Image: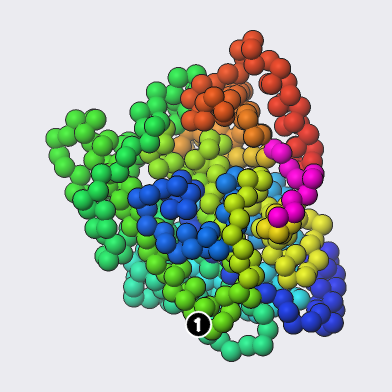
Amino acid sequence: MRRRVFLSSLLAASCTRKPTRPNILFVMTDDHASGHVGCYGNSLVKTPNIDRLAAEGVRFTNAFVTNSLCAPSRATVLAGCYSHIHGIKGNSEMKGQVENFDRKLTTYPQALQAAGYRTGIVGKWHLSHDPEGFDTWRVLPGQGEYFDPTFIEGGTKKKYSGYATDLTTEFALEFLKQPSEKPWCLVYQHKAPHRPFLPPPRFAKLYENVEIPEPATFNDEYKTRAVAAEAEDMRFDVSIAGDYKDLPAGLDAKAKKKWLYQRFVKDYYGAIAAVDDNLGRVLKHLEETKQLDNSLIFYTSDNGFFVGDHGWYDKRFMYEPSLRVPLIVRPPGGGARVAAQFAMNIDIAPTILDYAGVQVPATMQGRSLRPIFEGKPPGDWRESVFYAYYENSWQLAGKGLDARSDPSFQFFTPHRIGPHFGVRTATHKLIHYYSEKDQWELFDLQADPNELNNLYGKPEAEAVTAKLKSELERLKLHYKA
């Protein structure tokens, strides 16, 4: 009832609004870490079209997710609220572990559709219910496949020949080429560069003769960080060797790790190159049809990613490579700007609705980024971010439980990470791992940007610890966590 009343009010309001609202293109990739985009300082990865958006729009240097997992982040963007509000706390891919999105909440596509927008989604969806609020939808089931994937359209499955990133773009262009007098919103979401990293043949050897530098934390020994030390399943030299059938035999541990890293990153970059190449096709269409300057365009990822950082792949932890995402926004008409304010993925939906002239539902917990785009950041803009990760593997570790059959094991991940809350400010980060284990981590991000030295419990850190614990409790109350 709550959502029906809200949408009815939007529909009535749209009848009197002048048709000057911008088109909206929301581009989301999967596991694209901000440190692996050209405009964020990476000189090896080839992202000229993403870089173009940054040159013509706003690039956020401090953009964060609320929960570094695929499904929770996608639900958060749609509903503009945290996992404990919308109901998607984990990826829910284990048998019997399906989580349901709270469909009483109004998502930004539903609000736009009710306000007269033509809406569509193509590509990755990764939620347990069919897309709602879209006039047309063609999505991958679950994670989907890179080559010759099946897509679901209106409940019907159809297998296509080709590469998922290319096909998703073909479907995006089909939507964009449909004649309509309505403003449109297209949610254009890629599977790439999700593991296993499978670039298309045209980019498979893009980095064949390139030596990729290893990250500073490549050989992290996890001293002072007990939880990180247990996350051995996230070590790419342990867990992804099976992805590569051509791994040479007879390598010692060091050589094997080096070989896997080079292959891992080159394939990752090849998948990213395909995303960027296809984004260029979409931007070219918008330019040729004179829609570019009347469009609000977002580029982001569902979460960050460890690309060899700390010797890992994957995400989940509140450490910087996982917590941070690229966030680039080209507002209507463009306007180059670099923004240092803390942005979060809960802010995307309110920003879209702000530009569309649509009322923001009270259930959305973020704020519109529009004042920042316009160079007028509010004086009360957030100075800290709250993180909440819920999946739990500690119940399994050491107990011999089978997560696929034990009903008491609600959220399972094989990555040896427990649920944790955390707060990040401009200078420090405090993380609290709870559940079966109760552990804390404190990092001085200025002196220790790689988060190697846990200061929690040290006498010299008592004052900052108390301050951050107070801020963490304030944020829990603010977000009703």
Label 1 SS: helix
Residue 418: give x, y in percent of width and height: 56, 33
Residue closest to the eye, 71 or 453: 453
Query: In this image, 322 relative to 267: left or right?
Result: right
Q: Give above or below for 389 relative to 223.
A: below
In the image, residue 209 lies in the stretch drawn in magenta: no
Looking at this rendering, what residue extends furthest in the top direction?
A: 459
Residue closest to the eye, 375 or 176: 375
Tell me where the magenta segment starts and ends, as one range.
375-384
Residue closest to the eye, 339 or 23: 339
Give the quarter of the figure containing the C terminus: top right
Give the class, few, some or many, for how many residues have Cα within 10 Å of label 1's Cα (few <14, many ≥20).
few
Q: Give the residue drawn at x 53%, y 59%.
A: 54
Residue closest to the eye, 245 or 37: 37
Task: Please identify the quarter of the rendering in which residue 25 is found.
Answer: bottom right
Looking at this rendering, what residue extends furthest in the left direction?
A: 250
Give the quarter of the figure containing the N terminus: bottom right
- Tag 1: amino acid: Glu
Q: Give above or below for 9 relative to 451.
A: below
Residue for badge 1: 288
Q: Give the residue drawn at x 54%, y 49%.
A: 325
